[in-house]
Structure formats: structure tokens, C-alpha cells
Image (cartoon, rainbow, N blue to C red):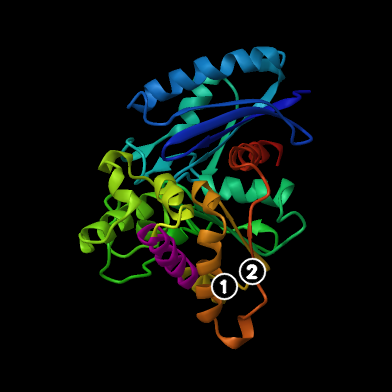
Amino acid sequence: MAEFVIGVDVGGTNTKFGIVDRRGTILEQSRKLTNEPGDVEGFIEDLYNKLMPMVEKAGGIGNIKGMGVGAPNGNYYSGSIEYAPNLQWKGIIPFAKLLTDKFGIPVKLTNDANAAAMGEMMYGCAKGMKHFITITLGTGVGSGIVIDGKIVLGHDGFAGELGHTIIRPGGRLHKGTGARGSLEAYASATGVRETAIELLNENPQEKSLLRNYSLNDLTSETVYQCAIKGDDIANRIFKFTGQILGEALANFVMFSSPEAIVLFGGLTKAGDLIMSPTRKAMEENLIQVFRDKVKLMFSNLKEADAAILGASALVWD
């Protein structure tokens, strides 16, 4: 009987992967840049070359039950990545089939945020919960909705794209989708950078540590570093971001009444700078029956672990 599975998380910037046993222990893991090489065939070849030494250490491909993959716009039903706005691969990519052909093992695929939600439900702070939402604040804004202990997939496999809900009608352009005012355009790491550029341009006379960075070096991480040093513009960026995120979460709460909302992803490293305004805005925008009921928390899993474990759970299931 095969003792291990491969878990792969395809993110907008990085792809994380590892070998996982039945107890949810990650034996070995690594990462690679998602968009290098630029074409999907080159990506799979590079992934194969990086994974196979791990597979050999685990006893060879015959000891691998299968591969679970979480990917942007990953469709559980078809095994395809379809029109992912944050990837260079355009159109419909038969990703699971390409991986099966290359590795010679069964491959199951789902949305990357759904995979992370499964990891959170099986191994993280949502263990034992039957109603919760995970929100990934990374290059984009991913989400996984769990109701009655099951991931919400919808009739076509694409349910739960909360990051693409419109929270500011007619607002900021999302370059990947062409939509205006989506949550992802504001509350992602990319959105934080856009807000920083906007505020710096709107307040040309105001001093800020952020002006010490070139546009290429201006990231959510540099905004955080400036904010903890007391920079006023940097702190306003997080307050603005948290307000928009909290307003959106209030809508999500009133839709599915979760026990908890679990935040994870790179932006959560900002800690209370993002959590405090988010919680405040969420509670202010809830009607009375929903107030002070929903736990808003950071994931207690390492970001890479949650995604790899969740993806691997697709195979054990």
C-alpha cells in the first residue's frame, strides 16, 4: 500500500510542494517560482525535476498514492485551471492530466484556497468546525467556504470566489479580470501596493519613509516595515485595507453565518495592523443578530504547510 502523497500549492508568485504521510506529516518540502519557466510545460518539467529526488527518498513513485493540487481557478470536477487571472498561463489548462501524464500517478485538483481550507479543517485552528471561511491574503485574495463540514464547490466547481466580489462598485481596476472594485484589487498584497502608490501620489508634500523605495521595491512588506516605524501613510494604508476587508467579511458572515473566519497568507504577517481595522469594520457592518459571534483569527499553520496539507488531503479523501 502506498504510504505517501504529494501535495502541491500553485500560488500567483510561488509554488510550494512536498511529500506527506497519512498522519499529515510533511516529510520534505520546497518551492519554486510559478511563472518560471513561463509556459506550463516548462513549469511541469521543472516541478518534476525538483520533486523526483524527494519521491526517491520516500521509496520511489510506487510508494506515492497520488498527487493533490491546489491552484488558482482550479476546477475539482474537470481537473483544469481555467482562466486564472494571476497566472501567465491563459485559457483552460488540463493541469491534472498533464501532471498524470508526467508523473504516472493519479492527480486531483481544486481551487488553491479550497485546498488551504481543507488543510485548516483537518490540521489547523478550524479542526472540528463545520461552518467556517478561510481567506487567503496573498498575491490575490482566495477563499474557501465550508458549510456543514463540506467545501462549497457549486454546480461547476467555481463557487466561493469571494476575492472577486465587488466591494467598491466602479472602483479600482483589477488588471487580471477587468473588473472594477473587487475585494482582491484592494485587500491583496498587490492591492496594498496599489494603495501605497495612490496615497503617495495624492499627498505629494507629505513626508513618508515609503518615498525611499523605488516603484519596483514598493511591496506590502515594505509598507509593513514603514508602518511599524510609525510612518503615517503606511499606517493609513493598512487602516484603509482593513476597512475594506472588514466590510467584505461582514457581507460574507451575513451570507453563511460561519463560526469563524480564518485569515492566512503573506499579508497576515502585518498582525494587528491588518487585524484591528478589519475586525472593527466587520463588526460595524453587521446587523445585530450577527454581531460578536464570529471568531476572526489568523491561521496557526505555516502558510506553506496549510496549502500542501490541504492539497494532499484530496488524495487521502
Q: Quadrant of the N terminus?
A: top right
Q: Secondary structure at mark 2?
A: loop
Question: For residue 231, which quarter of the picture?
Answer: bottom left
The foreground one among 213 and 263 is 213
Could you tell me residue 243's position as x and y percent?
A: 45, 70
Identify the element where label 1 is drawn: helix
Quarter assignment of residue 134: bottom right
Task: Give the dominant element type of the magenta stretch: helix, strand or loop.
Answer: helix
Q: Decide: is 142 above or below 180.
A: above
At x 54%, y 74%, the residue is 280
The amino acid type, in three-letter code, at marker 2 is Pro
Q: In the rendered structure, are the residues bearing label 2 and label 1 in contact, judged by CB atoms less than 8 Å apart?
A: yes
User: Is residue 47 rendered magenta in the image?
Assistant: no
> Residue 226: percent from the left, percent from the top?
42, 51
Per the image, the residue denoted by label 1 is 253
Q: Which mark is residue 258?
A: 2
- The magenta segment: 232-247
Residue sitting at x 35%, y 62%: 182
Q: Nearer the viewer, residue 28 or 38?
A: 28
Residue 88 versus residue 299 in the image, above or below: above
